Image (cartoon, coloured by chain):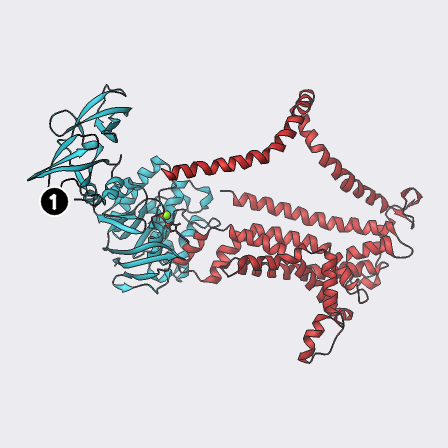
Amino acid sequence: MGQITLSNVKKSFGNIDVLHGINLDINDGELVVFVGPSGCGKSTLLRAIAGLEKITSGEIAIDGKPVNDVTAADRGLAMVFQSYALYPHMSVRQNLAFGLENSKMPKAEIDERITEAARMLEIEPYLARRPGQLSGGQRQRVAIGRAIVRRPVAFLLDEPLSNLDAELRVSTRAELAALHARLSSTMIYVTHDQVEAMTLADRIVVLRAGKIEQVGTPLELYNTPANRFVAGFIGAPHMNFLEGTVSSVQSGNLVVALADGYQLAIPARETSLEQGARITLGIRPQHVTFGSGDKSIKAKIKLVEALGSETVLHTEVAGQKFLVVIPGQHDLASGMDIDLSLSSAPIHLFDKDGHRI
Amino acid sequence: MTAPLETASKPSAVQHLGAIALAPVRLVMGLIDRPLRALQRMTGLSGMAIFFLAPNMLIFGIFVLLPLFINFVYSTTGGSALFLPERSYVGADQYQRLFDCSNYLDPLTCQEDAFWTAVSNTFWFVVLQVTLMIGAALVTALILNRNLAARSFWRAVFFFPVLLSPVVVGLIWRWILQRQGLLNFILYPFGVDPYTWLTDRTWSFAAAVGVSLWAHMGFYALILLAGLQAIPKDLYEAADMDGTKPARVFWRITLPLLMPNLVVVIVLALIRSVQVFDEVYILTGGGPGTSTLFITQYIYETGFVSQPRNPGLAAAASILMGLVLVVLTLVQLGLGRRGEKKGKR
Ligand SMILES: Nc1ncnc2c1ncn2[C@@H]1O[C@H](COP(=O)(O)OP(=O)(O)O)[C@@H](O)[C@H]1O
Ligand SMILES: [Mg+2]
């Protein structure tokens, strides 16, 4: 119960292609997060799964059964909308009951389910209120409650936290994770916030412009991003990229020349790179340390952000922007030249098309 | 680096246009700035409020409040003279005359039977016309709110009659309904003998209701359409996910959320329906007999047409009608305020 398979799902609005062939297997009980920049088609994909949007081609199957021609109501899914979509003229209780009444469920069972969900979400005191008399966080719980009482095959959540303030978002995120653990049903969660994706997901699906860029666990995406886009999207602050050319390939070593002549030796995996090939180095800001020696680069500090627990340095390396995050507090000022060591940094390599090497 | 350039040049073009449009405004502002500042120094801030409100209050006073008062004075005078000083004071006589009936259930037993016929006609007209109006406007709005082809064309079609002058509306339909009119021309091939619709008591009343319906429906449909479009789409999607039947969606979601607009429409339609006059007067002239005689026409004819004319009686009748309208308006204000409280988030 709750296994969803997408095969070559395409969607166009008129002559605008929004989804370009999505293939994805979502396992029962899994919490999958669709993440990607705004406008990349996350909501469209979710709505296609929900049955609110008819797909142009391809197939969606739930528990092995194709549902292309099954109405939204009969797919057995529940959706939590970004705007919550609560009925403003009904009390919280009526909001929770509305969907259940459609299926002519006995009153006693409806009450039982509402009580259970209300207790789980701690909204019991508000059952008689209208959505307009609730805070944003409470409304959000009611929206989730409305999905829970239906006992759906899978939950679909479209940016459910985006209307909450930063603090509430963090706590609600944790509660959502707990809720998923408790319900152990399939959840598809859409967000543009990679931190939400990293903290919640069993698996993350990174989307860009209607295509899947990579699917994997949060740490897989962090440690081995499949391409430059994923590398830049996952992790905060985002990964540094240094453009360069291969100046020599020796067994076990790759020497890369950066824009202004720096030579950097990198232990190379087996590669088919040739001398003179354009290449991008990816280095996460947190993996850089102070220090000279081999595998070090010279940087010029442009801006210092002292956050107390860590210091963020906006620097320039070989004429390119380079961000450094160093733990602790440091007596540095803009304009200073420093040596940065990459000896403990995993260096990601991307070819001229942005693919991981 | 072309993209940032493009985005930077766009607002500047808009700013340029804005500057041109604002130039005359700036000029006027510059001219009146000093005198107004001087005035404000003299009168203080609240004095300025009165200064800005005064023109409107003056117009309202001269053209609404003063005539209302004069009308009341007229209703306490008798005779056929139009000039107030030539009229004699009769107290509540005109009101007594209006209410002088031996049986209040039968207009014909009243001294002013025409008034009561008009009241009864107006009552049935209001009941019928408003009921049909709400129904038709709601159905039209619901249809126009769907994703049908050429939606703005259909919207225009339904709104167009609202733009016509009432006289034109009356003339168009008289031309359609007369003996040699369009309707008979259309019906003739189907074996319907030409009929003078407007000389039949029932048909003529139906025509009065129908024509005023046609003339004003677009306006109310537009208000309801605006209300429908303000209902968030995702409420319907949520209901869709829950498998809600269309009828239940209408009764439990659409109608309650449309209620504020519906109340406005009902009360506006009621008020305008009570005042029915122009297009129906052109269409039927109140006839045949008194079958389409409504209160406003009665007032007009009593005060200006009949011989001898009786402005005092007409004034008394219009005061009574005014009271009914005041009650309806208060109901609207009350309901509106309640709706506002309910809608508060
Ligand atoms: N109903 C629609 N008609 C036309 N284009 C649409 C419609 N819905 C979405 N789009 C387009 O599809 C793209 C993806 O939209 P969406 O799925 O909402 O993005 P996301 O949720 O990732 O921000 C956008 O470019 C958007 O303009
Ligand atoms: Mg979206």
The crowding category of the residue bearing disc 1, from other C-alpha atoms within 10 Å (few below 14, some 14 to 19, many at least 20), is few
| Residue A51 sits in quarter | bottom left
User: Badge 1 sits on which subunit?
Assistant: A
Q: Secondary structure at mark 1?
A: loop
A222 on left or right of B292: left
A223 on left or right of A66: left
Looking at the rendered structure, the kind of residue marked 1 is Thr
Give the x, y percent position of residue A27. Answer: 22, 55
Q: Residue furthest bottom?
A: B191
Foreground: A116 or A227?
Answer: A227
Q: Where's the N terminus of chain B, which quadrant?
A: top left
Chain for colour red: B
> In the rendered image, is residue B326 in sight?
yes
B288 on left or right of A267: right
Give the x, y percent position of residue B197. Answer: 74, 71
Q: Which residue is mark 1?
A: A271
Chain for colour cyan: A
| Residue A160 sits in quarter | top left
Give the x, y percent position of residue B168. Answer: 73, 59
